[in-house]
Amino acid sequence: MERCADITRKTKETDITARLVLDGAGDGKIASGIGFLDHMLEGFAKHGFFDLTMTVKGDLHVDGHHSVEDAGIVLGSAIKEALGDKKGIRRYGHCILPMDDALALCAVDLCGRPYFAFDCDFSVDRVGDLDTELVREFFYAISYSAGMNLHIKMLSGINSHHMIEAAFKAFARALDEAVRKDNRITDVLSTKGSL
């Protein structure tokens, strides 16, 4: 059975459609109107072996905030829906990922309870056409809409492009580990019996 989700979210600020396949080949087709976000989400798909198609039409004449935050909400909702009852998944994932000067740590728990910790300081306000402060908003939105405990910490880094890209790739690899099926897990990985 394919673990996938189709999500549509339409507000006065954004109109977003997305399809996520957890057991994919790493194929990303993203059109958000924010080129650097497209690049990051294509990297997320590639390095997590997810298939992700996402189209974002947002009020970019205002700024990128609504588009980026709502893209995070939609991606988090897609992750939650594609996981279903979470039976047989590893639940936890982590990655320490280097990218040139940047070294990013990401840890994920698909526990059903949102919690978000983000320790990354960027030296510039923008990378391409993405406000760097929106990186935190994006991952926060994923955490809360997916019901995911998500920690991202930049262990070192100088170049903001490298740091953001390392965070996205580390998240992809940690999530790939967490959603992976394990034959030893016959129900859900919790003493409570549910996630």
Image (tube, rainbow, N blue to C red):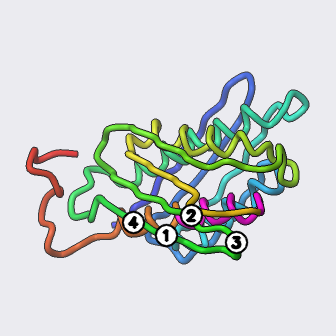
| x then y, percent, for residue 7 | 54, 44
- The kind of secondary structure element at disc 3 is loop
Identify the mark at residue 2; answer none if there is no mark. Answer: 4
Identity, as a three-letter code, of the amino acid under mark 2: Ala
Mark 1 and mark 4: Cα distance apart in space: 29 Å
Which residue position holds label 1?
96
Identity of the residue drawn at 50% across and 72% down: 24
- The kind of secondary structure element at disc 2 is strand
What secondary structure is the stretch in magenta mostly built from?
A: helix
Tell me the magenta residue range: 159-170
Identity, as a three-letter code, of the amino acid under mark 1: Ile
Which residue position holds label 2?
104
Mark 3 and mark 2: Cα distance apart in space: 10 Å
Sequence-first disc among 2 and 4: 4
Return the residue nearer the eye: 150 or 88. 150
Image quadrant occupied by the N terminus: bottom left
- Look at discs 3 and 4 and give the one toward the viewer: 3
